[in-house]
Structures are given as C-alpha cells and as structure tokens.
Image: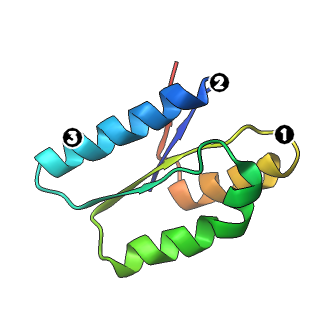
C-alpha cells in the first residue's frame, strides 16, 4: 500500500486518483482507499477496506490519509504501518 499525506486533503485525494490511473494505464489493477478526510469513518472501516481490496487481488493500493488530530492520530498510525514506509507527501 502507498499512503498519500498532506495538508490539503482534496489535493491528497486527487493525487491518489492520479496514481491509481497511472497504475491502471501500466496494466496494474489498482485499489483506492479514500475516506475524504473523515477520520471517524476511517477508524471504523480502514481494515475492512484493506481486506476487501486484498480479496479482489489488486496489484497496488493507494490510500489517502486523514488529519492527525483526535482519532485521526490512531488512524494515521495504522495507515503508516500498513504502508510499511511507502508514503508520499503531497505539497
């Protein structure tokens, strides 16, 4: 999984979609996890979404991060662990 982070969450979402489109153009099956910055929803559904994409046998997964405040701190910790160092910061 590649995790995209940044201050402007709409830019992060756009970068995730662009990365998935490039991967598809290169012949890879891409999956996207994007909660539109909603940390509460991400806290409930991140692992479900991740498992779902794994079961679909996608080649690559691109995920949009959430703000690191409140529950978002824990969500981002989980997302970083899942990304295993594959993190792109969007300016």
Return the x and y of residue 16 as percentages of the image width and height. Answer: 41, 40
Query: Quick check: can you spot residue 89?
Result: no
- Residue 61 picture location, percent across and down: 39, 57
Q: Earlier in the sequence, mark 3 or mark 2?
A: 2
Query: Total label count?
Result: 3
Side of 12 relative to 59 (left or right): right
Q: Quadrant of residue 67?
A: top right
Residue at image position (84%, 39%) is: 69
- Tell me the distance, in whole angstroms, between the alpha carbons under discs 2 and 1: 12 Å
**Extreme-top residue of the structure:** 91
Q: Of marks 2 and 1, which one's residue comes earlier in the chain?
A: 2
Q: Residues within 10 Å of mark 1 (few under 14, many from 20)?
A: few
Which residue corresponds to mark 3?
22
**Figure check: 10 above or below 48:** above
The secondary element bearing badge 1 is classed as: loop
Q: Residue at x 47, y 46 (%)?
A: 86
Dot 2, crowdedness within 10 Å: few (<14), some or many (≥20)?
A: some
Whether residue 6 sits left or right of residue 27 in the image: it is right
- Whole-percent x, y for residue 21 in the image: 24, 43
Residue drawn at x 40%, y 75% as measured from the top left = 54
Report whether 29 appears left or right of 2: left
Task: Indicate the quadrant containing the N terminus: top left, top right, bottom left or bottom right.
Answer: bottom left
Front residue of 80 and 48:
48
Residue at the spot of label 1: 69
Return the disc, 3 or 1, that comes first in the chain's sequence.
Answer: 3
What residue would you read off at disc 2? 7
Please provide percent x and percent y for residue 45. Answer: 64, 68
Specify the farthest residue to the bottom: 55
Viewer can see residue 21: yes
Element class at badge 2:
loop
Callout 3 secondary element:
helix
């Amino acid at each position: 999984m590649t995790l995209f982070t940044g201050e402007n969450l709409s830019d992060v979402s756009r970068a995730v979609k662009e990365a998935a489109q490039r991967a598809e153009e290169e012949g890879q099956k891409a999956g996207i996890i994007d909660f539109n910055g909603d940390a509460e929803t991400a806290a409930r559904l991140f692992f479900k979404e991740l498992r779902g994409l794994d079961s679909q046998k996608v080649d690559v997964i691109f995920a949009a991060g959430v703000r690191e405040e409140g529950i978002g701190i824990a969500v981002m910790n989980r997302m970083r662990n899942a990304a295993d160092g594959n993190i792109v910061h969007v300016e």
